Amino acid sequence: MRLGGVEAGGTKMVFGIGDETGTVLEMKSVATTSPEETIPPILDYFLSQQVEAIGVGSFGPIQVDPDRPNYGAILNTPKTPWKGFEWPRAFAQVGCPVVIETDVNAAVLGEAMYGAAAGLSDCVYVTIGTGIGGGVLAGGNLVHGLLHPEIGHMLVRRNPQDSFAGGCPYHRDCLEGLASGPAVELRWGSKGSALEADHPAWDMEADYLAQMVVNLTLVLSTKRVILGGGVMHQAQLYDKVRDRVREYLAGYIELPSSANTNSSVNASLNGNALPKQHSPEKPSDAFIVPPGLGDLSGLVGALALAARSRIKPPH
Ligand code: ADP
Ligand code: ZN
């Protein structure tokens, strides 16, 4: 099956073709400026490729309900040129099904099919970068509802040592307001990448991310939480978050043991080089993991969306 995929980010759009095994055959990218500038090269590319379906994982918020007339429209975004932009209309000329999801829902699907949660029907993917966003797979379905999950804006308990007011323009000290890359930079007066691995910033960051993981675990009963994005380049955060999660859960919920999660951790993506997966030693090591597909989760997820649309109607 020849499929098209687009990972539409706020800075750049990565697009390409691949197949239903998650193999990326070709990949290109274009800067995200305005629809007038950014879309034509992507459309021309798909017109020349004879794809059977196109999957799009887009920055949002977006209308993901296929029963609504504005299915696939970008809603109330601060990126004003994109407000009201409709993905299905943009690719209508290609003449194939176009499936739209949030960028993070595409990523969680990619990871659940071919990456760090391969084979799991319940997992969450969260990116901690310029903003915080998460996609949820529950019972094998990507979660939508009133809109789609907005994990970044969950409310968290303020760390007692934290005097930073928070940077979310809507809620000030929601999770994103306290723990995004820009929040770290504003609080400590230095880019996160310039703060040493043993800087107190990371204990505070781990506290907030652990609260998020605990809330996700309690609400969704999810089986794995994948943490990605620029801030997670601070690799020491994984163990710090795992330790805090154990403290917060206080034994109330037993995390899955490595024995029953190992097989899916060692998944491979046909044809694509994957970062080596570690063998988990503690249950929390298998529960909170880095993305298995590296930078490819979004694009591979978009291909998986396209593949699913050929097998069953979207959602
Ligand atoms: P985006 O969210 O815009 O798609 P990223 O996931 O790369 O992009 O996240 C960018 C954010 O991550 C920035 O706020 C940046 O300061 C932060 N960041 C990038 N690298 C690191 C690092 N090594 N340590 C801490 N923070 C980092
Ligand atoms: Zn918020």
Image (cartoon, rainbow, N blue to C red):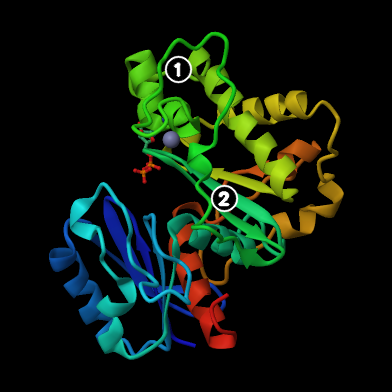
Q: Where residue 196 is drawn, which disc sits there?
A: 1
Residue drawn at (26%, 66%) of the image: 85
Residue drawn at (44%, 53%) of the image: 295
Q: Is residue 264 visible?
A: yes
Callout 2 secondary element: strand
Residue drawn at (49%, 52%) of the image: 294
- In the foreground, 118 or 187: 187
Give the side of residue 169 with respect to residue 226, left or right.
left
Asked if disc 1 is less than 8 Å from ligand 1, the answer is: no
The residue singled out by tag 2 in the image is: 125
Q: Position of residue 237 (x, y in %)?
A: 57, 28
Callout 1 secondary element: loop
Q: Which quadrant of the structure image shows residue 40?
A: bottom left
Q: Quadrant of the C terminus?
A: bottom right
Q: Position of residue 74 (x, y in %)?
A: 32, 61
What distance separates the C-alpha of mark 1 from that of mark 2?
Answer: 26 Å
Task: Give the amino acid type for the residue marked by disc 1 in the picture.
Answer: Glu
From this view, report whether residue 185 is shown above or below residue 281: above
Q: Which quadrant of the structure image shows residue 138?
A: bottom right
Which is in the foreground here, disc 1 or disc 2? 2
Q: Position of residue 106 (x, y in %)?
A: 50, 62
Give the side of residue 301 with respect to residue 123, left or right.
left
Residue drawn at (57%, 27%) of the image: 156
Task: Give the amino acid type for the residue marked by disc 2 in the picture.
Answer: Tyr
Other-residue count near label 2 (Cα within 10 Å), few / some / many at <14 / 14–19 / ≥20: many
Other-residue count near label 1 (Cα within 10 Å), few / some / many at <14 / 14–19 / ≥20: few
From this view, report whether residue 311 is shown above or below residue 102: below
How many discs mark residues in the rendered view? Answer: 2
Q: Position of residue 225 (x, y in %)?
A: 65, 46
- In the foreground, 13 or 175: 175
Give the side of residue 55 with respect to residue 84, left or right.
right
